[in-house]
Image (spheres, helix red, strand yellow):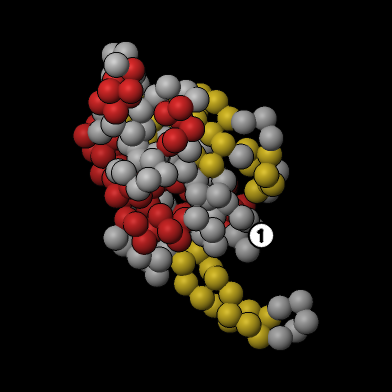
Amino acid sequence: MGTGSFFLGHRPAVANNFQTGVSDAAQFFVNQNESNASSIVQKDNVKYVMTDYEMAGYNDKFQAIALLSGQGVDTFVTTQAQLDQNGQMTQQLVPTDAYYNTMVVRLQYEDGNGLSHYRLIHESPNSVGTIGATEIKAVKTFEYVEGAKNSCSRQRKRYALSQRHHKSKSDVQLHTECSAERHPRVCGTLFDERDALRNEN
């Protein structure tokens, strides 16, 4: 998403497809503490955060993000013996509580409910599935603001998500635009604003 934000949206990003800035982006996405996550946003001068369903998928790109963050996958995903459709006992991937507390899951699956500084401002029209009765959109964009706490019930959504974790295929890419005067930055693919200015000249 970072390269697309740069070339199509003309917005620098914190990280890109060439692995520039991926550590900051990964640490933001898997962070379980909003204050710590926001310190990364502030350091990188981020204005907008973009997520998608693949980045939030515990059995998808989320695992790569967890590895790039330095925390590893085991903190967020474990294995559990379960019966398959044929009645055979197999090992299945099961997300942990830590996974549900990550910023990428709270943004993509819960629309930032319960967070104080991330306001949902746009989501793609196409849905990739449902959690309970809630449709999950493919891509979402959030604005980082001083205060925008959402009041929807997070526990209700968390329960619905945990009931369907074995069916969800999602992964969230974080894009955050920096609050630069001329070139807001997009975090997720984290581009440096100087790169955009360099390409303009």
Q: Residue under label 1, please give it.
A: 167
**In the visual, does 45 lie left or right of 117?**
left
> Which of 150/174 is in front?
174
Q: Residue furthest left?
A: 43
Amino acid beneath label 1 = Lys
Q: How many other residues sit within 10 Å of disc 1, few (<14), some (14-19) or many (≥20)?
A: few
Q: Quadrant of the C terminus?
A: top left
Vertical arrangement, residue 156 with respect to residue 47, above or below: below
Q: Position of residue 132 (x, y in %)?
A: 68, 48
Vertical arrangement, residue 145 with respect to residue 41, above or below: above
Q: How many marks?
A: 1
Q: Residue furthest front?
A: 201
> Which of 16/34 is in front?
16
Residue at figure coordinates x 34%, y 57% from the top left: 68
Residue at figure coordinates x 43%, y 36% from the top left: 2
Asked whether the viewer can see residue 148, the reply is no
Q: Residue furthest top?
A: 182
Q: Position of residue 198 (x, y in %)?
A: 28, 23
Q: Position of residue 193 (x, y in %)?
A: 28, 26
> Which of 3/68 is in front?
3
Asked whether the viewer can see residue 84, the reply is yes
Look at the numbered disc 1 and give the secondary structure of its residue: loop
